[in-house]
Amino acid sequence: MMIPAYPGCRVVLAIHDDLKGVQALGRVVTYLRVAGVFLFAALFPVSAYAVDMTSSSDDLRYALSSGIDFARTALERTLTSDELSSERKIRIVISADERIDSPWTLPDKNGPFIQFNVGTARLVYALTAAVYNLSEPESGKYIGHVFTRLKQEAASTSPFVNIDPFYKWAKWTPQQISNFQSSFDKQLFIDRATLGVITFMLAHEIAHNLNGDLNHIHPPPEEARNREIKADAWAAQHLISLNMGPNIGMFSLLYYAVMDCNALRHEDRLRHPADLRRIKNLADFTLASLDKISPPENMTREQMRDRLQTVSKNLSQYIGAGDGCSLFHEKR
Ligand SMILES: [Zn+2]
């Protein structure tokens, strides 16, 4: 097992090393899921491999590594040969660290690596499931609830310990929960949306590598913000060329906003100014590129446009008006 030297990581696991066996199975499952092959539903109970925010660290780490493996393969198809040869040098590290933190990219003596924490995957699963299964304004309230609880739990080792999944928070009956957990369609949708968010995060980090941002890790704030906007644009462009959904980048920024504005223990390297400009840029870019994206089933292009505009507006509200982070910086 390869353990890159990086402060603050309790357990670091290189995904192409000791997860190989599990990963091969994960790859098969992911391909099947993403391709929408429903045969599995008849063969295996969904709960056998579906994960959510309450899953064990190992299960989430495995889901995250198989998702990233799929996302990376897809993204590589959109790269030029020069980009591809740089991208191939990047290692991806999935850490069992439960802290919620933006994925980041850094060089070490073996070259550049991008690190994802399990805590981040937990947050993405928690919010994606809520966004797609609660109606407005309940999903917004749940997101607010998670923000508040994360702030309260920031000092604990595992910040999710005392946070309920959306179905418990919304006081669903055991029957409702059981129906939700055994619905292959619903689980598939959450998995695909989560994978999209993770793909965006991965693409954003790959963009930093390809843009040469690692050569100068602590730029002045203005340049740091421009780098983020450039990396977002690159990620959005590549997701759109893969015909991935228009809401994906927007949701990713919600997670960045939670992770950064909430400033859970990483004020010292706040490299993602999660301000509303990033969301607006991404919304504008996606809206301008909408004719390149197929609408999901049962949705017209106009409905997709409306949805995107609504998401953009609502995210702005969740993240907070004004300075964009005010919601998270209020006194405890
Ligand atoms: Zn960034």
Image (cartoon, helix red, strand yellow):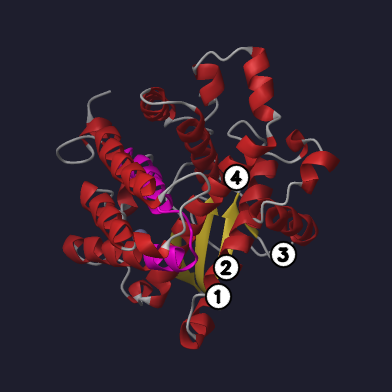
Quadrant assignment for the C terminus: top left
Circle number at residue 17: 3
- If you read the primary sequence from the N terminus, does the residue marked by circle 1 or circle 4 appear first? 1
> SS for tag 1?
loop
- If you read the primary sequence from the N terminus, does the residue marked by circle 4 or circle 3 appear first? 3
The kind of secondary structure the magenta stretch mainly shows is: helix
**Kind of residue at badge 1:** Arg
Q: Quadrant of ligand 1?
A: bottom left
> SS for tag 3?
loop
* Camera-side mark, 4 or 3: 4
Label 3 to label 1: alpha-carbon separation: 23 Å
Label 1 to label 4: alpha-carbon separation: 21 Å
**Kind of residue at badge 4:** Asp
Count residues near mark 2 (Cα–Cα under 10 Å), then give few for <14, some for 14-19, many for 20+. some
> Would you say the residues marked 3 and 1 are in contact, meaning their CB atoms lie under 8 Å apart?
no
- If you read the primary sequence from the N terminus, does the residue marked by circle 3 or circle 1 appear first? 3
- If you read the primary sequence from the N terminus, does the residue marked by circle 2 or circle 4 appear first? 2
Residue receiving disc 4: 191
Highlighted range, magenta: 235-262
Label 2 to label 4: alpha-carbon separation: 16 Å
**Kind of residue at badge 2:** Ala
Residue 76: x and y in percent read: 55, 74
* Camera-side mark, 2 or 3: 2
Circle number at residue 77: 1
Question: Mark 3 near ligand 1 (CB under 8 Å)?
Answer: no
Which residue appears at 42% of the width and 32% of the height?
Answer: 154
Count residues near mark 1 (Cα–Cα under 10 Å), then give few for <14, some for 14-19, many for 20+. few
Residue receiving disc 2: 74
> Would you say the residues marked 2 and 1 are in contact, meaning their CB atoms lie under 8 Å apart?
yes
